[in-house]
Image (tube, grey):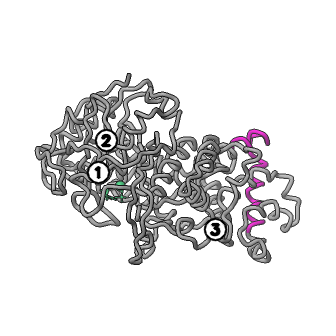
C-alpha cells in the first residue's frame, strides 16, 4: 500500500481556475490537472531499484502500467502541474511551467519522500503552443541517462518506468519543415522535488513577494530542514547551500563528461540534481567547445567548457529572485562569489581522482599546472575522453623509459585519428605523460590503489549518443532487448564487464554527423 502526502498541494496556493486551458497563472504555485488518457499503453521499461525505493512491486503490474500511462489514478493522488519561469539562452522567457509534466503524487516511501511525475502525459495550462506529449526517443534517453547518472554517483532525478502510449506524436526533428510522426512515450520521473531556480524567478518577476515567500519557506521546511526555520538568515543559508550543491553538480558533470545541453534556469534544480534530460550529450572527442544541442550552435552557450560559468550565471538569476526576501545584496553577492573557489577546488579534487593522485596541499599549484597541460594535450588531436582515462590507468612510471611512440602508443585506443598522432602531436602528448608519470612516481599511493582510484573516477560505460541512437532504433522496431541490456550495463559504469565491450566502444565513423548521434535538437 503506497502512502501519499501531498505537501506541495496542501501547503501552497492552487490556481483557482479548474479548466485545463493554456493561460497565465498568477498567484499560484501549481494547477490541478489530470493526465490525458492514451490509446494503447505498453510498458517498455521498469526500473526495479527505483520501484523498491518507492515501495512498489519489483515487476510492473497491469494496473501500474495504466497509472503511469496517465489512464487511471490511484486513490489519494492529486495530480498537478507546477508553475515556473526561466531564463532561456540568457533571456527572460516569462511563464513556462510543467507543459507536459504532471506530478501524480508525493510518495512517503521507505527510501524517503518522492514526487512521482509523468513526463509527456498531455497538455496542462503551461503547455503554451505545444502538445504536452513526448516521443519515444526522448523519453528513452531521459530514462537511460538519469539512471546512468545515478550509478555514476552524480546527483540526479531518477526514472521508474517508460510506457509507450500507442499514439503517434508529430515532431520536426531537424526543424527543417519536415515533421514526421513518431511513437509517443511517457517517462515516470522520481525525485524528492522538481523545484527549479525558475520556480522562484516567476513570482519574483511579477513582484509577487507573498507567493515567493511561501515557495521559499516551503522549500526550507520540506527540503532543507537543517538550515533552520524561515528567516532572512535562513534564506541566505539556503542560497549558499544551493551554490555549493550546484558547484559540486557541475564539476561532477565535468568529471564524467556530461553536457546538459539546455542549462536554462528552468532546468536547474534547487536541490542540486541533474534535471530535464533533453538534447544532452557525452563528450567523446575531448572538446570544451562541444555542444550536443543544434539550437545552441550559434553561441555555444551550453558547451562542455562553459557549464561552470553558466551555472554561476544561473545562480545569479536565483540570487536576484531571492533578493526581495533578504533585502541585502552583500551576503548574496558573497555567496555567489564563493562559487568560483568551490568549483576550482572541486575540479582539483575530481581531476586528482581521475589521475590517481593523492591530495597533497604542497602540490596544489603544480597539480593545477599539470591539469592545464592535460587539457591542452587532450585537444591536440581528437581523443576519446572515457577511453583516454581508462587507458591512462594502465600506464605506469616505468613507462617513462619508453620511446615517445611506444609511450603514446599505450593510449592508441582513445585516438580517433591514430595516423595524426605523429611529430609534434606525439611529442606533446609524450611530454605531458612523462611529467604526469614523474608526479605519479613521487605519490604515496601504491600502483594498485592508484589504478583503483582512477577507475573509480573514470567511467568506462557512459550513455554515448550513438549507442542511444541504436537502442532507440531497435525500440522503435519493437526490440527492447538492447535497452534492457544497456540499462544493466550502466548499473556498473566503472567496472569492466567482459563480453559487453560494445557498450564502451568509441564512436564509429558513421555516427560522426548523424542526427541523434552527433546532433540533437530540442525537438522531443
Ligand atoms: P525544456 O527546455 O525542454 O525543459 O522545456 C521548456 C518548456 O517548454 C517547459 O515549460 C516545458 O514544459 C515546455 N515544453 C517542452 N516540450 C513541450 C511539449 N511537447 N508540450 C508542452 N510543453 C512543452
Ligand atoms: Mg525543462
Q: Residues within 10 Å of mark 2 (few under 14, many from 20)?
A: many
Percent x, y of residue 384: 67, 62
Mark 3 crowd level (few <14, some 14–19, many ≥20, 10 Å Cα): some
Alpha-carbon span between mark 1 and mark 2: 9 Å
User: How far is the residue under mark 3 from the one under mark 1?
Assistant: 41 Å
- Is the CB of mark 1 within 8 Å of ligand 1? yes
- N-terminal-most mark, 3 or 1: 1
Q: Is residue 238 above or below residue 26?
A: above
8 sits to left or right of 402: left
Q: Secondary structure at mark 1?
A: loop
Judged from the image, the secondary structure of the residue bearing numbered disc 3 is helix
Front: mark 3 or 1: 1
Q: Is residue 209 left or right of residue 270?
A: left
Q: Quadrant of the C terminus?
A: bottom left
Q: Main secondary structure of the magenta part?
A: helix
Query: Tags 1 and 2 in contact by the CB under 8 Å rule?
Result: yes
- In magenta stretch: residue 443: yes
Q: Residue at x 74, y 74 (%)?
A: 425
The location of residue 460, given as percent across then percent down, is 67, 50
Please tell me whether mark 2 sits on a helix, a strand or a loop: strand
Based on the displayed image, in which of its 4 quarters is residue 74 positioned? Answer: top left
Of callouts 1 and 2, the N-terminal one: 1
Task: Give the camera-side residue of 295 and 329.
Answer: 295
Name the mark on residue 103.
2
Label 3, on which residue? Answer: 376
**Closer-to-camera residue (456/261):** 261
Q: Is residue 293 above or below residue 143?
A: below
* Residue that mark 1 sits on: 98
Residue 222 located within the stretch drawn in magenta: no
For the magenta stretch, what is the residue range?
429-453
Q: Which image quarter is the N terminus in?
A: top left
Amino acid at each position: 500500500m503506497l502512502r501519499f502526502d501531498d505537501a506541495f498541494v496542501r501547503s501552497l496556493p492552487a490556481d483557482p481556475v479548474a479548466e485545463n486551458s493554456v493561460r497565465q497563472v498568477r498567484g499560484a504555485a501549481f494547477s490541478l490537472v489530470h493526465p490525458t488518457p492514451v490509446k494503447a499503453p505498453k510498458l517498455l521499461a521498469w526500473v526495479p531499484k527505483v520501484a523498491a525505493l518507492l515501495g512498489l512491486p519489483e515487476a510492473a503490474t497491469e494496473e501500474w502500467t495504466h497509472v503511469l500511462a496517465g489512464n487511471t489514478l490511484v486513490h489519494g493522488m492529486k495530480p498537478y502541474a507546477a508553475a515556473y519561469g526561466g531564463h532561456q539562452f540568457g533571456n527572460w522567457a516569462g511563464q513556462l511551467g510543467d507543459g507536459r509534466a504532471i506530478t501524480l503524487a508525493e510518495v512517503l516511501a521507505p527510501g524517503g519522500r518522492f514526487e512521482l511525475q509523468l513526463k509527456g502525459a498531455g497538455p496542462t495550462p503551461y503547455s503554451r503552443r505545444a502538445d504536452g506529449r513526448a516521443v519515444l526517443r526522448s523519453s528513452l534517453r531521459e530514462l537511460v541517462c538519469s539512471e546512468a547518472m545515478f550509478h555514476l554517483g552524480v546527483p540526479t532525478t531518477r526514472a521508474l518506468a517508460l510506457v509507450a502510449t500507442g499514439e503517434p506524436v508529430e515532431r520536426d526533428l531537424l526543424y527543417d519543415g519536415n515533421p514526421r510522426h513518431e511513437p509517443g512515450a511517457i517517462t515516470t520521473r522520481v525525485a524528492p522535488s522538481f523545484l527549479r531556480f525558475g520556480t522562484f524567478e516567476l513570482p519574483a518577476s511579477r513582484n509577487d513577494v507573498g507567493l515567493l515567500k511561501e515557495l521559499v519557506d516551503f522549500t526550507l521546511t520540506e527540503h532543507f530542514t537543517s538550515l533552520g526555520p524561515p528567516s532572512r538568515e535562513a534564506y541566505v543559508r539556503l542560497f549558499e547551500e544551493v551554490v555549493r550543491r550546484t558547484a559540486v553538480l557541475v564539476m561532477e558533470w565535468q568529471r564524467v563528461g556530461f553536457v546538459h545541453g539546455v542549462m536554462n534556469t528552468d532546468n536547474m534544480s534547487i536541490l542540486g540534481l541533474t534535471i530535464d534530460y533533453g538534447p544532452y550529450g557525452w563528450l567523446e572527442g575531448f572538446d570544451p567547445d562541444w555542444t550536443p544541442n543544434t539550437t545552441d550552435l550559434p553561441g555555444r552557450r551550453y558547451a562542455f567548457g562553459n557549464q561552470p560559468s553558466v551555472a554561476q550565471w544561473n545562480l545569479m538569476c536565483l540570487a536576484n529572485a531571492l533578493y526581495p526576501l533578504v533585502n541585502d545584496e552583500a551576503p548574496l553577492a558573497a555567496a555567489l562569489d564563493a562559487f568560483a573557489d568551490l568549483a576550482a577546488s572541486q575540479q582539483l579534487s575530481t581531476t586528482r581522482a581521475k589521475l590517481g593522485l593523492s591530495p597533497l596541499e604542497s602540490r596544489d599549484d603544480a597539480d593545477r599546472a599539470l591539469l592545464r597541460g592535460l587539457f591542452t594535450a587532450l585537444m591536440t588531436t581528437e581523443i576519446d575522453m572515457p577511453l583516454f582515462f581508462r587507458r591512462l590507468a594502465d600506464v605506469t612510471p616505468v613507462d617513462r623509459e619508453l620511446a615517445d611512440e611506444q609511450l603514446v602508443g599505450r593510449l592508441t585506443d582513445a585516438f580517433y585519428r591514430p595516423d595524426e598522432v605523429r611529430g609534434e602531436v606525439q611529442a606533446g602528448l609524450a611530454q605531458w605523460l612523462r611529467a604526469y608519470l614523474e608526479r605519479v612516481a613521487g605519490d604515496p599511493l601504491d600502483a594498485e590503489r592508484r589504478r583503483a582510484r582512477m577507475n573509480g573516477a573514470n567511467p568506462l560505460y557512459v550513455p554515448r549518443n550513438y549507442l542511444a541512437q541504436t537502442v532507440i532504433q531497435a525500440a522503435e522496431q519493437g526490440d527492447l532487448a538492447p535497452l534492457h541490456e544497456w540499462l544493466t550495463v550502466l548499473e556498473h559504469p566503472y567496472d569492466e564487464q567482459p563480453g559487453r565491450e560494445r557498450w564502451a566502444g568509441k564512436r564509429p565513423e558513421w555516427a560522426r554527423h548523424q542526427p541523434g548521434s552527433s546532433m540533437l535538437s530540442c525537438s522531443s
